[in-house]
Image: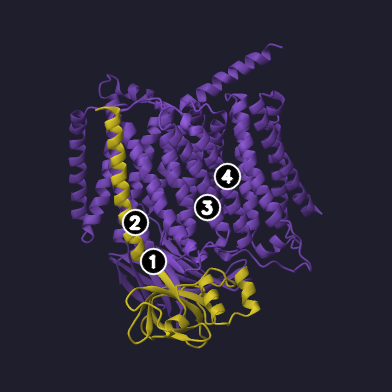
Chain colours: A purple, B yellow
Amino acid sequence: MIAELGHFSLVLALAMAIIQSTFPIMGAAMGNLTYMSLARPAARLQFLFVSISFGILVYSFLINDFSISYVANNSNTLLPWIYRFSAVWGAHEGSLLLWILILSIWTIAVTYFSHRLPEYFLSRVIGVMGLVSIGFLLFMLFTSNPFERIFPIPLDGADLNPLLQDPGLIIHPPILYMGYVGFSVAFGFAIAALLGGNLDTTWARWSRPWTLLAWIFLTIGIALGSWWAYYELGWGGWWFWDPVENASFMPWLIGTALIHSLAATDKREIFKNWTILLAICAFALSLLGTFLVRSGVITSVHAFATDPTRGIFILALLAIFVGGSLVLYAFRAPSTKSGGKFKLLSRETFLLFNSILFLVAMLTVLLGTIYPLIIEALNLGKLSVGAPYFNAVFVPIMAPLIIFLGLGVLTKWKQDDFSLLLKQLRNLLIASLFIGISIGLIFFENNQLKSIAGIVAALWISTTSLYSLFVKIKNKKNKLAAMRIISRSFYGMLVAHIGFAVCIVGITITSQHSVDIHQRMKIGDVIEFSNYQFHLKDLKAVSGPNYEATEAIVDVIKNESLITTLRSQKRTYTVRNMPMTEAGIDAGFTRDIYMALGEPLDNESWSVRLYHKPFVRWIWLGAILMAIGGLLAVLDKRYRLRILKKKIITINNEAIP
Amino acid sequence: MTSRKKRILIVSFILIGISIAATLILTAFEENLMYFYSPTEIANGEAPKVRAFRIGGLVLTNSVKRNPNDLKVTFVLTDTVNEIKVIYDGILPDLFREGQGIVANGKMKPDNVFVADEVLAKHDENYMPPEVAKALEDAGALNPYQENKVAK
């Protein structure tokens, strides 16, 4: 009974979504305030119904209601409760419901935090988000009902895929979806601006904090996914250019271009059309990502449960949204006038170049991701694009991007003096080169050239960023006071760029200097590896709530002192009879020591993988810094001040009856 | 500089950049395309002699043999019509089992043995790599039961 209630609640949500999109958009076009005023309540009611539906699905998982097919396929009585909870989004139907829930969370957030938006504009934004919601609710009701019953009711469930029974997987999908779906807000703002026809720059200012928030979530979501793959898959890799990783990376690349382009549109009234196009593109890539993950068209570690007819539905949605918005764009964009003029040597130029580089980078990833699908769809054979392609292409695209980043940070808006710029840059460049080369020569014996290139790039980014802070305060008497009045978004930029530099250091050193061996080991064996001794002390049987495991206990010794004791498990999850590796990792600021059990061999020995991975933590540390930078920019006073002012006005208005 | 000249300069920069990128991308792309061949296609001599490619099939029961002292392992892949011997030096994935569908990347050696650099098995015991399913289907070996699994 309760499951049917969940299903019915989804139908009600659909009805609300229809009201939420039709009346406000019509109202905005006709100037009808009554119609427009429906936007907020409809969005809030839609959120209520989606939440009820989601809550019921959670409840069904927690009480093990195996009469629901989705629960029976993805849960089990032995599953710990926290994984029964996260199993809600462990497969297709539930993760789609999560998608819709997050969309409605973003929508009501817009209804609550956009008091300063003109009514007609807000109505359009909410209306467009309602349209997206209609598409996904229809998709769900027609192809992927999570509340479908099965008969006969199984005695126990088929269990959650053991790969997903991990703390990282409890938070990774919701955070990633917050990012994906968050771009629907930027999309809503862009379409609302196009519908209104007045592409002034105010929409860019309004949409900036939202876009930044979505970008922050996406950044953290991708980093979490990478971290999870690193410790859970047992291969010691942190990025595989897997189609599903690419699916999240493409909107990130465009999202990064978008937040920069929005800043330029907001401050200098330029790149208006380009920014709109980027906003549409970011959302289209989010939809494409959903399609790639959920359609079953790709060979991937993520392709758990998939169904081609669903893929066609999402592809149709994608075509409608992208096609529709591009047609609208084609009608409206030519009438836009670009505001600010700028010279060739200006921050605008470098921003534009990097925007284009991000687009090119996205297109190369797109090519490598969907080319195999196209070839297969045309029946021209089966092929795949190897990871070396992405590495070979991506690094050369990032090189000019990094150079332009440093130049752009130091160049002024509008125009700059070439000789002055050169004077500033010369010292920074020499310093970066000198320090980078010294570090490379002193610390690394092999792959020196690549290591130096990476370190110099990181130094270039950090020194130019810090120097731009110095430029701001060098003529001030009280430097501390001067630093205090600099805007938060400036510090946000600084922190995010340094985060990027940290990430580059991590990626460079990890990929150039990680070492690994695959070895046979039995109890008592000692392996010398990368200046460490690994001593396999014991192998013992352990059992968890729903698995049996063999645990290896390994002492890591350096210079005759014990560094750490690693524990790695090979688990067999009993319900699905599926083996899983739990790596033993000693994490450190400058290196990880990583051990994973391979497979049991004859005469009581096991195959073992050992890795020494220098600076691997810096990759995720960099991502965290980027996210913090984004957050600083969101918290900039220029956004908050207006809300505050507005609040005071409303309070005053309310005070007068 | 007039704004017209400036615009021409910017556009030409962008065009040069894009053509360099395109050349680079397409070269790397061409070099890294990995085609898939089934054991039958290899038996028919369709697979490349020098280039790396992908192979897929079922691991033949009782064909997995390990070296006693290191991690070298040999096994036979089959699409139920033709078979091919595979050599691999390393740790096999968790879900590698006899009777299971797997995919391997590597090259053919002149003695008709496939030397794998990488062996992939999917993280779901019911899941069959689509390439393998297709290869089995082409060989006429896919029964409805397995088809069911693939559709999952």
What is the three-letter code of the residue carrying label 2? Ile
Same chain? Circles 4 and 1? no
Same chain? Circles 2 and 1? yes
Residue at image x 50%, y 74%? A540
Question: In terms of sequence position, does the residue under pointer 2 or pointer 1 come before the other?
Answer: 2
Which residue position holds label 2? B25
The answer to whether mark 2 and mark 3 are in CB contact below 8 A is: no
The answer to whether mark 4 and mark 1 are in CB contact below 8 A is: no
Measured Cα–Cα span from mark 1 to mark 3: 22 Å
Q: Nearer the viewer, residue A601 or B108?
A: B108
A104 lies above or below A395:
above
Residue A657 spot, x, y in % from top left: 72, 12
Question: In terms of sequence position, does the residue under pointer 3 or pointer 4 come before the other?
Answer: 3
Residue at image x 56%, y 53%? A290
Which residue position holds label 3? A289
Which residue position holds label 4? A321
Give the label on residue B33, or none.
1
Tell which tag, 1 or 3, sits nearer the viewer: 1
Residue at image x 34%, y 79%? B49
Q: Chain of mark 2?
A: B
Q: Chain of mark 4?
A: A
Instruction: Classify residue A478 by image quadrant.
Output: top left
Residue B151 spot, x, y in % from top left: 62, 69
Q: Chain of mark 1?
A: B
The answer to whether residue A77 of the structure is visible from this angle is no
Q: Nearer the viewer, residue B109 or B21?
A: B21
What is the three-letter code of the residue carrying label 4? Phe
What is the three-letter code of the residue carrying label 3? Gly
